[in-house]
Image (cartoon, rainbow, N blue to C red):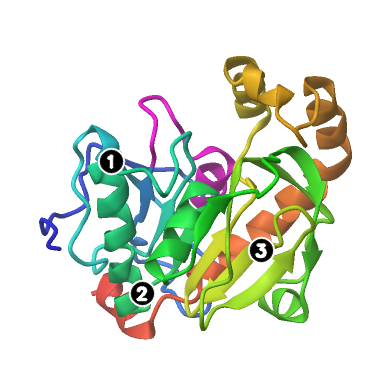
Amino acid sequence: MSFLPIKANTETVLRFPGRLSASPLRSPVSPLLPILIVLHGETSTPGRVGNTLRALGYGLDIRRPRFGDALPETLDDHAGAVIFGGPMSANDPDDFVRREIDWIAVPLREQRPFLGICLGAQMLAKQLGAKVAPHPQGRAQIGYYPIRPTAAGHAACPGWPDHVYHWHCDGFELPAGAELLAEASDFPVQAIQAGHAFGFQFHPDVTYAMMHRWTTRGCERLALPGAQPCHQHFARRAIHDVTERAWLKHFLDGWLARMPMSVTSEAAE
């Protein structure tokens, strides 16, 4: 599979007048490389992940392969990549689904920071050879559910929330060679790490506005077995969101510090 070698599109790179970075690995005066953002809806946004990355000083190079955007052949012009969720399945036969799964070989090969969220995590699992499938009893996770970080999860990023927001019917197995960072009951694999690549079955990206949209436009899914009623989404957000937001910021800062020293040096030249 080949991909068109393209530079970050300045029309889609969004800038934020925040700090550049506090990491000792990055120059405090040189501009940071943008983060490649892969979205699956015409009006989808990177939500809280995008807000946090902008606040850390990163531009966002937003691509929508489902609507014809190309993916870069290399991440030399990016600090990392995030593939977000969507209503489709990683098992769907659509060409853009297959292309995104195949493309994840790029950050894996180049050892660049990669994050897959929900559908993006399932795509990572498939790229690594693991099975993605619905729950055997047809259950869904839609709402806030408890997770249990493993010892590897605590080592990768401390301060995990004990409940996180979900919106999915498929789950994935632990790929060979990957580490399990967090687990749960109905869908045992909740977070994984494979080198510099991470996958989260849950949605730390969801803002309050996004939750309103999802529970309104996807209200029929709230009737699925295991899904929580709409009012519980907002009631539990009031309890759990502060911890999840703080953990996400801590995770993203450490995740981006994994960018190879050679890349940060080139960006400063």
**Residue at point 28%, 52% (across, down):** 98
Residue at 57 percent across and 16 percent down: it is 217
User: Residue placed farthest to the front in the image?
Assistant: 137
Q: Are marks 3 and 2 in contact (CB under 8 Å)?
A: no
Judging depth in this view, the residue of 126 and 84 nearest the camera is: 126
Q: Is residue 57 visible?
A: no
Marks 3 and 1 sit apart, C-alpha to C-alpha, by: 25 Å
Q: Quadrant of the N terminus?
A: bottom left
Q: Amino acid at mark 1?
A: Asp
Distance of label 1 from label 2 (alpha carbons): 23 Å
Give the residue number, with chain letter if any, for mark 3: 189
Left or right of residue 176, residue 108 in this image:
left
Q: Quadrant of residue 211?
A: top right
Q: Is residue 162 visible?
A: yes
- Residues rendered magenta in the picture: 39-53
Q: Is residue 31 above or below residue 225?
A: below
Nearer to us of marks 3 and 2 is 3
Tag 1's secondary structure? loop
Report if residue 159 lies within the magenta region: no
Helix, strand or loop at label 3? It is strand
Instruction: Report which residue position mark 2 lands on.
Output: 108
Q: Quadrant of residue 113?
A: bottom left
Residue 55 location (% of width, % of height) = 54, 48
Residue annotated with mark 1: 94
Q: Residues within 10 Å of mark 3 (few under 14, many from 20)?
A: many
